Amino acid sequence: MTELSESHDDPFAPHLAALVVLDDRGVVVGWNRRAQELLGHPDTAVIGRPAIEVLVAPGDLPAVTEAAANCRRAGGWFGVLPLRHRDGQLVELGLRAHELSRGDRGREWFLAGALAGDVLEWQRDRAVLDGLYRQCPIGLVVHGPDQRILRVNRAIERFSGVPAADFQGMSTGRMLLSDDARKAVDRVRQVMQTGRPLVYSEQFVRLEQDPARERVALVSSFRLEDPSGRVLGVAEMIEDITDRHRAQRRLALLDQVGSRIGTTLDVAETARELAEVMVPHLADHASVDLLQAVTRGEEPTRAVAAGPVVRLGTCGVGAQQPGPPHPEGEPVEFGPGTPQAGCLAEGRPVLEPVLPPDWVAAAGRQGAQAPDLGAHSLIVVPLAARGLVLGVMTLWRSRRPDAFETDDLTLAQELASRAAVAIDNARRFTQQQQTAFTLQSSLLPRAVPDQSAVEVALRYLPASAGPGLGGDWFDVIPLSGARVALVVGDVVGRGIHAAATMGRLRTAVHTLASLDLEPDEVLSRLDDLVNLLAAEQEAVGERPVGEQVVGATCLYAVYDPVAGRCSVARAGHPPPVVTAPDGQVALLDLPAGPPLGLGGLPFEARDIELAEGSLLSLYTNGIIGERHIDADVGLTKLCAALARPAGALERTCQAVVDALVPSRPSDDVVLLIARTRMLPPDSVASWRLPPEPASAGRARALTSAKLTEWGLEHLAFTTALVASELVTNVYRYAGGPATLRLIREQCLVCEVSDTSHTSPHLRHARTTDEGGRGLFLVAQMTERWGARYTREGKTVWTEQPLTGPPV
């Protein structure tokens, strides 16, 4: 079948049709060449003969007779009849008959005929063309070579609201706003010049007579040419896809809400993401205001809904376009009668399609906070989740001329509903985090205890970009003999479970430190405790999903400022870094030991000499980098940062954090730097006493003399008595030499060491007992006392305040 663009001319045109003239009796009086070509009869064979006799087969006579009768009644006829060819075959012709008046000579009938197939094809073409202009729902515009409109169809009339006749002779884009008109003119010119059609190009259409209404059209353009190639103009098929475009935009917004909002469990960030998604796709300005209680992670109530709100998200189009007057993070107060106040109180959306020019300044509207005086349309929707209003989202239009519609309100409600779930999740996470941080902070030391062995600077930074806080901890524990224990640890896992386990381990470390155990022995006892905790959790089915039941790493160091010696042991923890006074940095070569919780494996301590002013740096994994970074790289960076001490210990500590820790660490960070001190030689006195009765008297004499030298005469009698009692116990029960040592620091320390591991016991002696009162007297005359054990034996120690006698 011939394409529409290549269709034949009218088959009934005089130069194409078979033309026959009949008189009123049906006799052929006229016969043209085309009739001879179609039916085979020359004019000499048919003129003067009845047409029925020559051209109609006997079987078709009834149909022909009926058609002739209808033609006489109506004065004309159109239809298809079979006519007989000269060779006897039947030829179907489409016939059109018209009556011709000859005045006094009567009537004649003019018949035009063509092959039935050509007639039907021509009729279809005419029907298609007529349908395009009269019934087609897609707009049709024909532009002439001079870019003036020749004709439009009725769809364009409906689309524009302008009668079709008014378009004739109008220049292209005449009825559009300037920006849209320029694009339309450029498109028609391009197609006319190049001949390349444009298919499905989107065009925003705003009419001059209705500039506030923005429509979207899908335009396909092609050039019109005659058979010789002469350009006749450009035809454009225009489809109104405004509703489809809006639906696609809504789907895109819903998709963005799902992919962009809630990327973090941070309330403020989620609010900002929501505001940014709204602009410019739905609004020119957007603000998200949340109840102050929600920003703190608290559960909102209806009573809270009337409370203050905080603006956490704002966004506006254009770099020079003013935003809402309240900056992000600032409290906002919505006055009575404002849409936002009503929305918060009732949880119902508000749609103000058209705002009067004085709307913002009207009474009771001051709290509405329009971003600029050009705002002409408003939507306020509640941010509600689980039946609780968390805040409101306000949308404005100022640049876009079209007002908000009901569909826009429905979309805004859907977006706000989805975003509210993300905001509520962030709020609940904030609440959980705050609870966990409160628990963790209550379990960590509030301040470094006062001691003279080391100067300490530390940093504890909780994770801010992970699934919860970790179980890192630290401690500085004063020990007997002016010593100090430095501890860092890291519990496996995250969240409240890890924080609670950390608290139990820290308490255990304090208990073990009070026993004055060696570092490796402390870790062995901790390992037993972790195994016990793991067994308890497995027994009750409390194992966290995807986590080890209980596990931890720990480093325990004891520094003695008298000897300048540090004893260190670690359980799967990164090794400490030692910075010498001259700036030389080295990782302490220390056996790693298994993490706590594996059970049955030994730990090994190592003693090192530390010059006065050395830096001993203890830390957790968070300081040496993220988990996916090679630990060796992180350790190299840490050593480089510690090789450049910044003078004051606090500045050094902060410099290390600035150099190694990201702004939002994904793991807890603990950094503890201790600068060693040495007690002055004249603050320590030590004597070795033989195992004989006279040693008690000698201990009293040496003690009294030294305290007098130190200006502590008021402690001489008490301390001499304590020293003699302790030396006497060594003579009686240990059977070996005793070492008496006095230390003057924040308090007066008296120590007596021996080679026995027998534990001293405090008891009340009976009236008939000759002995057993020594330790009781020691306990009464001193502020504290205790015993610690070493590989060589034990040391019994006492402490007395320097300012006066014990209370």
Image (cartoon, rainbow, N blue to C red):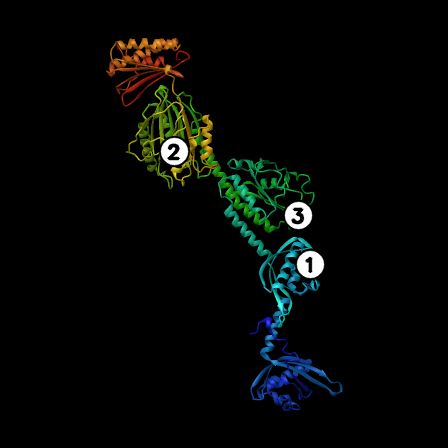
Q: Is residue 696 visible?
A: yes
Q: Are marks 3 and 1 in contact (CB under 8 Å)?
A: no
Q: Earlier in the sequence, mark 3 or mark 2?
A: 3
How far from the left and from the top, in percent, is residue 726? 30, 14
Q: Do the residues under discs 2 and 1 have CB atoms within 8 angstroms?
A: no
Residue 504, visible in the rendered structure = no
454 w.r.t. 419: above or below: above
Circle 2 is placed at which residue position? 490
Viewer-proximal residue among 134 and 735 = 735
Residue type for callout 2: Asp
Query: Three-letter amino acid code at disc 1?
Result: Arg
The part of the image, by quadrant, that contains residue 450 is: top left
Quadrant location, the N terminus: bottom right
Q: Residue at x 69, y 87 (%)?
A: 24
Label 3 amino acid? Val
What separation in Å lies between label 3 and label 1 (alpha carbons)?
A: 28 Å
State the residue in front, 315 or 91: 315
Upstream in sequence: badge 3 or badge 1: 1
Label 2 and label 1: CA atoms lie apart by: 75 Å
Please state which of the two labelled residues, at mark 3 or mark 2, is closer to the viewer.
2
Q: Which residue is mark 3?
A: 354
- How far across and how far down the image is residue 287, in percent? 59, 42
Residue 591: x, y in percent? 31, 32
Secondary element at image label 1: loop
Q: Is residue 717 above or below residue 581?
A: above
